[in-house]
Amino acid sequence: MSTSALPDTAALAERARTALDRCRVDRPRETAGAAGAARTPITGQELFPLDHDDTASVDGAVTAAHGAFTSAWRDTPAPVRGQLVHRLGALLREHKDDLAELVTIEAGKIRSEALGEVQEMIDICDLAVGLSRQLYGRTMPSERPGHRLMETWHPLGVVGVITAFNFPVAVWSWNTCVALVCGDTVVWKPSELTPLTALACHGLLMRAAADVGAPADVHRVVLGGREVGEALVEDRRVALLSATGSTAMGRAVAPRVAARMGRYLLELGGNNAAVVAPSADLDLVVRGSVFSAAGTAGQRCTTLRRLIVHEDVVEEVARRVVDAYKQLRDRIGDPFEESTLVGPLVGERGYTAMRSALERAGADGGEVLVGGGRRLAEEAGDAYYVEPAVVRMPGQTEVVREETFAPILYVMSYRTLEEAVELHNGVPQGLSSAIFTQDQAEAERFLSAAGADCGIVNVNIGTSGAEIGGAFGGEKDTGGGRESGSDSWKAYMRRATNTVNYGGELPLAQGVRFL
């Protein structure tokens, strides 16, 4: 890749402003000496200064969202609430390229992945609109004559959403679209690394609200660092706090929300593995593994980090994966280039963690088979482009059990499926998993209660690329939350059990006699 392919920071700043203008979003305040800044990992430099909110602003945002909830939104019929999300989906279709532009500029995703993320937003809008007519309760037989027993679902209130840089718009939409049709209002604190995408999404949602006559304060966005997020965590009016990030962040958030008897939904770290059986289709293994491990420069929560391969095929699998990785070397760089497959790490911290993990793996007897070096170091300056690495490990050492948010794939071998499952489950995280096999019995054992202990368990596909129709989330240190499809909408509502006496008499339950 030529050095001329790296764009100029000033040009990227202008592209960001143009995308915001096309979305008809008010320009962010580019105040000299502002507390924050918009930046890009493509060059590692600031695009322009950007004002951050303070804790008083968070209080104002929650007050406004709570007011909209109590005064109008909770009593708006769910199908009418769905009209807001329907209109948002139309605007997202109209501005798909503009949002993808901002995702690439701020998160460093290659163009196809950025477009794919915006498509996820469009898809969740479609799902949520249908959901607005399907918030079903239940009717159950009562043991008492002349009585009816049923369940109804009601909006919770204000939902706080804290998102990470790696999916700056999709995860917000998973939460917000479902929360809105459930009758909740939303206050969003995006990653401080991706404020422009948040402003664009908020602007489009405000346009949608104006178009359908919904209250403007059904959604608010607050920009800033840790103190802004902490204010959202502590506010008792935030009925549900949905947070995406590291396990360490989740450990700090959960007890603070629980202490005020609030609800939380956590999507935290992943240390995802794929088991490769001797019967596996190795073409599928290579294709699924390379994308899952190297896509988004290894910065997905569902990134494949461990490849557990049967000893009969481990040498061939390792060789074929290494050959595929070698083809990536000349396709690392500017994420706007069509030929690029691996863009930059989001910053220096990811590169430092990667180098440290590789050194620790070497000390544990691991061998780097390919990759691990930095590309374009002199030309990129403060940007960090790295070669995805494959490391052959003698076993599952401590560094393998940890999540390193960078493109490192550890390869290990096994003899029996029981051993493979033990290796697979022998990490604190439990997000996504996969098995490649043509043996139906092996697949079923991996899917069973005694198999993979993750929230997402796949057969003959990689660990990344979840669809919005299924509930997304994981177990153990991943937090236990579920977002997007299936019945995950129930997290955004409260359930009431109702008994209706229409018989004119008042028999007590369980045959109790009193008075």
Image: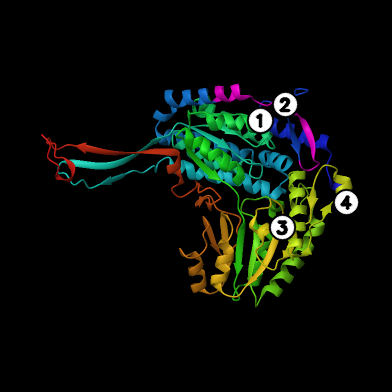
**CA gap, disc 3 and disc 2:** 34 Å
* Mark 4: secondary structure: loop
**CA gap, disc 1 and disc 3:** 30 Å
Circle 3 sits on which residue?
408
- Check if residue 43 falls in the magenta segment: yes
- Residue 2: mark: 4
Q: Is residue 220 visible?
A: yes
**Label 2 Cα crowd, 10 Å radius (few <14 / some 14-19 / many 20+):** some
Q: Of 404 and 60, which appears nearest the observer? A: 404
Query: Of discs 2 and 4, which sits in the foreground?
Result: 2
Question: Seen in the image, is 394 located left or right of residue 454?
Answer: right
In percent of width and height, residue 275 lies at 60, 67
Question: Seen in the image, is 380 located left or right of residue 197?
Answer: right
- Residue 35: mark: 2
Q: Amino acid under label 2?
A: Ala
Circle 1 sits on which residue?
224
Q: Residue 98: which quarter of the image?
A: top right
